[in-house]
Image: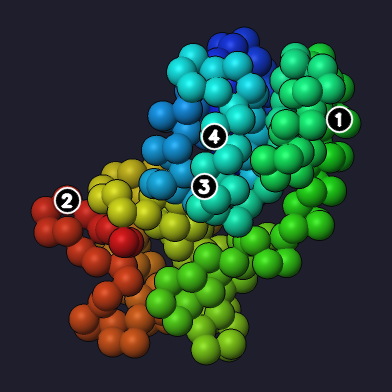
Amino acid sequence: MTKILLVEDDKDIILNLSEFLVSEGFAVKNASGQRAALRLMEEEQFQLVLLDISLSDGNGFAVCSAIKANYQIPVIFLTASDDEFSTVTGFELGADDYIAKPFRPRELISRIRNILRLTGSTRNIVRLGEVQVDTVRGTATKHGRDLYLSALEYRLLLMFLNHRGAVLTRTQLLENIWDIAGEFVNDNTLTVYIKRLREKIEDDPQNPVIIKTVRGIGYRVD
């Protein structure tokens, strides 16, 4: 699932646009200011950023500049500042598109998908050691060979990728994967799926270096 970071300080826009993007099949996180946006970029993996110029702290130009200097992902400006200076500045900083408010939601979706098509082949590969995850195609490979992850195994792996460096409790994992199987996944079943996932991605599943156990709490992927 494509994960989008929405950087916007208008609460109504955050609520309405997030709901619309989710209904179109995207996962969405939001930040209202520069510091929060850059912190999320460090903590999680995103495939695209929707960015306003006017923020609760800092500004969108600084966020765009930082993202383009450190991450290979596309940025689309969504802003009421549609003057020539703002538009030119946005593109000079590396923005992939610039959409003035108010905008038509369907047009936004079309332009998001177009940008993802243009940039997706090289910008949606996440690496975990020798494991490569293509978040657009929904596949995982190791040494070039498909790992043939089940839907639950892949969802688990995405959970870890999207919360890299954070400790995920067993409760958090259960709450986010039970519906993929179409039935309730209990604690024992989760243990089985963690074991299966490790067998596919770890060189030595008995001594995992990718999915680490944090005793008494849960798991972490660094």
User: Considering depth in this image, is 161 or 96 the residue closer to the camera?
Assistant: 96
Q: Which of marks 3 and 4 is nearer the N terminus?
A: 4
- Residue picked out by circle 3: 179
Q: Alpha-carbon distance for marks 2 and 4?
A: 34 Å
Q: Earlier in the sequence, mark 3 or mark 1?
A: 1
- The x, y position of residue 144, in whole percent, is 58, 87
Q: Which of marks 2 and 1 is nearer the N terminus?
A: 1
Q: Can residue 187 be seen in this view?
A: no
Q: Residue at x 73, y 40 (%)?
A: 92
* Residue 106 marker: 1
Q: Which of marks 4 and 1 is nearer the N terminus?
A: 4
User: Considering depth in this image, is 70 or 183 the residue closer to the camera?
Assistant: 70
Mark 2 burial class by Cα count in 10 Å: few <14, some 14-19, many 20+: few
- Horizontally, residue 212 falls left or right of residue 173, namely left
The answer to whether mark 3 and mark 4 are in CB contact below 8 A is no
- Which corner quadrant of the image does residue 121 belong to? bottom right
- Residue picked out by circle 2: 217
